[in-house]
């Protein structure tokens, strides 16, 4: 939405030509932009207005659910060809996203995914989950077979 408003020549911007995120959030949280007026202090509750709304009421409700829901982590910027599933594969034991790394062995470098979830092993210390590491090269073959040419 921020980029959309910044690209619009009619939307007010600051001196640097930017739209503040707070202004975007204000717009996304006011039901007036969905075509309804809601002023409980005046005794007005969701009255349909006469102007053409920029978004539908259903879209407004989805936006509210998204804004009020649990925050989601942004997509990783360091996803590369070596580890395309980083952050998308979940650990079976913990359900947390697995990370990936290279490991040096006798035969050279090995790419693999692993979980950094913590469990209590009964000693009072946390132990890192290493139950389900899997080879990244096997997944490269699977992904290449699924890709569209």
Image: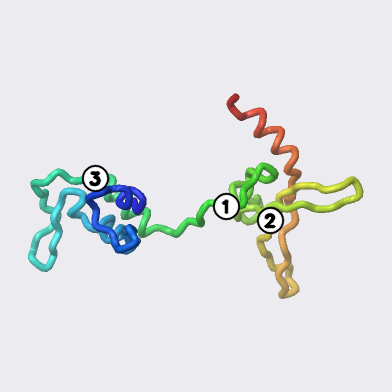
Which residue matches tag 2?
A: 115
Mark 2 crowd level (few <14, some 14–19, many ≥20, 10 Å Cα): many
Which sits earlier in the primary sequence, circle 3 or circle 2?
Answer: 3
124 or 145: which is nearer to us?
145
Mark 3 crowd level (few <14, some 14–19, many ≥20, 10 Å Cα): some
* Front disc: 3 or 2: 3
- Percent across and percent down for residue 96 are 60, 55
Residue at (73% x, 66% y) in the render: 127
Q: Residue furthest right?
A: 106
Tag shown at residue 55: 3
Picture layout, residue 67 above or below residue 35: below
| Quadrant hosting residue 130 | bottom right
Which sits earlier in the primary sequence, circle 2 or circle 1?
Answer: 1
Q: Element under label 3?
A: loop
Q: Element under label 1?
A: loop
- Percent across and percent down for residue 81 are 66, 42
Which residue matches tag 1?
A: 77
Residue at (72% x, 59% y) in the render: 129
Mark 1 crowd level (few <14, some 14–19, many ≥20, 10 Å Cα): few
Quadrant in which the C terminus is drawn: top right
| Quadrant hosting residue 19 | bottom left
Residue at (50% x, 55% y) in the render: 74
- State if disc 3 and disc 1 touch (CB < 8 Å): no
Image-based side of 108 in relation to 73, left or right: right
Mark 1 and mark 3: Cα distance apart in space: 31 Å
- Percent across and percent down for residue 57 are 23, 46
């Amino acid at each position: 939405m921020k980029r959309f408003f910044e690209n619009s020549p009619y939307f007010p911007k600051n001196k640097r030509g930017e739209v503040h995120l707070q202004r975007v959030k204000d717009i996304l949280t006011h039901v007036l932009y969905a075509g309804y007026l809601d002023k409980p202090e005046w005794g007005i509750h969701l009255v349909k207005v006469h102007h053409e709304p920029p978004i539908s009421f259903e879209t407004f409700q989805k936006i509210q659910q998204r804004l009020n829901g649990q925050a989601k982590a942004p997509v990783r910027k360091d996803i590369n060809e070596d580890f395309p599933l980083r952050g998308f594969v979940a650990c079976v034991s913990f359900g947390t996203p697995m990370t990936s790394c290279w490991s040096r062995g006798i035969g050279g470098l090995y790419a693999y995914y692993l979980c950094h979830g913590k469990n209590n092993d009964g000693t009072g210390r946390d132990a890192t989950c290493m139950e389900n590491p899997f080879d990244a090269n096997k997944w490269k073959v699977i992904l290449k077979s699924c890709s569209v040419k």
